[in-house]
Amino acid sequence: MQNFRITIQESDGRLTEQEAAVHKVLVMGYMGRDIEKVHEHIEELAAIGVAPPETIPVLYPQQIDLLTADQTISVSGSETSGEVEYVVFHDGEDWLLTIGSDHTDRLLEKEDIPKSKAACPKPFITSFWRIRDVESHWDQLVLRSWITDQARRRLYQEHDLTALLPFSELLTKLKEVGYSDVYHTVIFSGTVPTLEGFVYGSKFEYQMFDPVLDRRLNGEYEVVIGG
C-alpha cells in the first residue's frame, strides 16, 4: 500500500485535500475506442519490433512501489518514453480522475511487454477531478503531452477522449478479466497516438484540458538514465 496526499479540484473551484490509500496499480493497454486507431498503434509498436497483443485490450498489473508523484524518475536505458493517460481512482467514497504517464522501456518492450512496463516508474499527479463532474462532457476532455529532447521541446500527443474507451467501459473490461473490486486502485487508461512516433527525451510534460469547465490538470517529470 502507498499513501498519498491528494487535492480534489471541485467543479466550483474549491480545493479539497485528503489522504488517499492506494492498494493496487493497473495499466490498461490497447484501449482505443476506434479499432482502426488501435491497429495503427499496434503497427507503430511493430515498427520498433514489438509483437502484437493476443487480446484487445490488455491488462498489466504493476507493483505498487512503481507509482510515483515525483518530478524526477530514474530509468536504466536510453530508449524509454512516456505516454499521457487518463487515470481513475476510487478513494472508498467517490470515483476520481487525474492523469499519469505509462513510462515504458521501448527496447525491452520488443522482448517482453509486461517486463517493459515494470521496468519504469509510473508517474501521476495528485490533483484530481470528480468523475461525476465531467461525465456529461467526457469526450470533450483533451489529453496532451510535450517532449523535450536534444532537439527541442514540442507537442508530442494531442487528442480528445474519443480516442479511448470511456470510463464506464473501462470498468466493464476490468470486470471481464476478474477485477470487480477496484476500490483504492489506480487505473491507467491506455494512451492516445503520438504525433511523430516514439521520442526518447529528457523531460515529459502532460496535461488534461476541460474546455467546458475551463480547467487543466498538469504534470511533468525529468528522466534520468541510470540515476
Image (cartoon, rainbow, N blue to C red):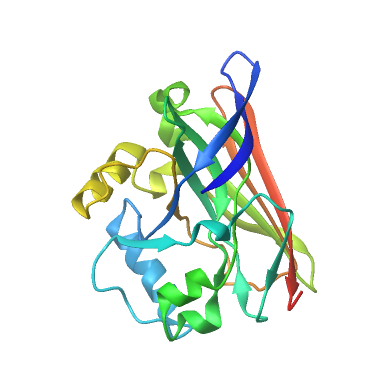
Q: Quadrant of the C terminus?
A: bottom right
What residue is shown at x 24% (from left), y 73% (from top)?
A: 54
| Left or right: 43 as drawn, with respect to 107 | left
Is residue 210 visible in this depiction of the protein? no
- Residue 177 lies in what quarter of the image? bottom left
Q: Is residue 225 left or right of residue 191?
A: right
Question: Which corner quadrant of the image does residue 151 belong to?
Answer: bottom right
The answer to whether 76 is drawn above or below residue 39 in the figure is below
Q: Is residue 147 above or below residue 94?
A: below
The answer to which of 74 and 140 lies nearer the viewer is: 74
Toward the viewer: 177 or 47? 177
Position above or below: 39 against 108: above
* Residue 191 x/y as whole percent: 47, 56
Q: Which residue lies furthest to the left in this view?
A: 176
| Residue 144 or residue 103, whichever sits in front | 103
For the point 73% across and 76% down, the residue is 225
Report whether residue 205 is seen: yes
Please indicate whether residue 214 sits to the left or right of residue 212 in the image. Answer: right
Q: Quadrant of residue 208?
A: top right
Rendering coords of residue 118 (x, y %): 50, 70
Residue lying farthest to the top in this orientation: 12
User: How far across and down, in percent of the image, does residue 99 sit?
Assistant: 56, 44
Figure label count? 0
State the residue at coordinates (40%, 27%): 135
Relative to 45, say whether 163 is above or below: above
